[in-house]
Amino acid sequence: MSRRSSEQWGRRVQAPDEVPLDVLIPTCDRPAELAVTLAGLAGQAEPAFAVVVSDQSAASPDWEHPAAAAMVRVLGAQGRRVSLLRHLPRRGLAEQRQFLLEQATADKCLFLDDDVWLEPGSLERLSTALDELQCGFVGMAPQGLSYLHDRRPEQTEVFETWNGPVTAERITPDRPEFLRWPLHNAANLSHVSADLSLEAGQWVPYRVAWVGGCTMFRRKALNRAGGFTFWPSLPSDHAGEDVVAQWNVMEEFGGAGILPSGAVHLESPTTVTERRVEAFEVVLNRKSASGNDEDNPGPPGQMRK
């Protein structure tokens, strides 16, 4: 087991320089949520991983909150390398994610939002799935457990497993694959998992429009697809930058969601209050204008969250 247990915490052991996974966490003015997110990581046994936190808080960094600081110390005692970086000024989420990607050195990188708690074993399940599926990314869509009693069959009817290899897909707002997005609302995936009667240790890949909040990439695949280098074309008050990056990866390498999802959304108010621009509208229009996306009919309007 890569995680050092409590009887070893007092021993001075340097965290390994090389690990198979980097966990990348963008945070801003969410100290309590960051503490919960880090606590979820402290509950993961495998694979070995390092953590990079990039903070854009207006005042003091989130990791200075006593609860978050305690979790940083726990991860360090467990043998995890934790890098705490201040990244200012704020230039938008895409630039923040590109900055985090540039810090990564491992073969795999997990973009984990600062308001997501992971069930123990989630990292191992994601990592195993990425190895076995050999696609560009896999993800666990965070579940809002306050909706466990809210079944939405009209939103889960689009659920479709990958039967066989995960192949490349092209997603744009005018294609039927785009209509998969409501599947990740509320606690829909918890209901789908229950209906599939999944056994302990079993996981199932399924087709997605994109996966927000908890997505593990092959780092080289994400870089080859351009990462988030489109950020200069966006105003700082944008949203949906992860959608664009995932669509680019899917078009060349494919991507999949994983059930069951061990990711839980903390359901705190968003810190991204200004969503004037959907990133895909700008990027797709730019491609169309350059002749690289001629069959795109234009922006569909604001995407439902």
Image (spheres, rainbow, N blue to C red):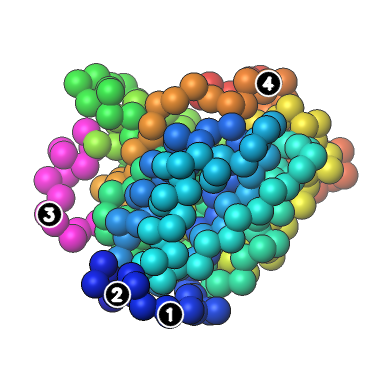
Range covered by the magenta-colored residues? 191-209
Q: Mark 3 points at which residue?
A: 199
Which disc is residue 274 wearing?
Answer: 4
Determine whether label 1 and label 2 are within 8 Å by CB: yes
Which marked residue is nearer to the observer: mark 3 or mark 1? 1
Which marked residue is nearer to the observer: mark 4 or mark 3? 4
Which amino acid type corresponds to the residue marked 4 in the rendered image? Glu
How crowded pointer 1 is (Cα within 10 Å; few <14, some 14-19, many 20+) is rated as few
Q: Mark 1 points at which residue?
A: 13
| Residue 180 shows in the view | no
**Mark closest to the chain's N terminus, 4 or 3:** 3
Q: Where is residue 106 in the image (x, y as percent from the top left)?
A: 56, 72
* Residues at marks 2 and 4, CA–CA distance in whole angstroms: 46 Å
Element marked by disc 2: helix
Which marked residue is nearer to the observer: mark 2 or mark 4? 2
The residue at the point 38 percent across, 34 percent down is 265
How crowded pointer 4 is (Cα within 10 Å; few <14, some 14-19, many 20+) is rated as few
Q: Mark 2 points at which residue?
A: 8
Determine whether label 4 and label 1 are within 8 Å by CB: no
**Mark closest to the chain's N terminus, 2 or 3:** 2
Which amino acid type corresponds to the residue marked 3 in the rendered image? Glu
**Mark closest to the chain's N terminus, 2 or 4:** 2
How crowded pointer 2 is (Cα within 10 Å; few <14, some 14-19, many 20+) is rated as few
Q: In this view, does 51 lie above or below 244?
A: below
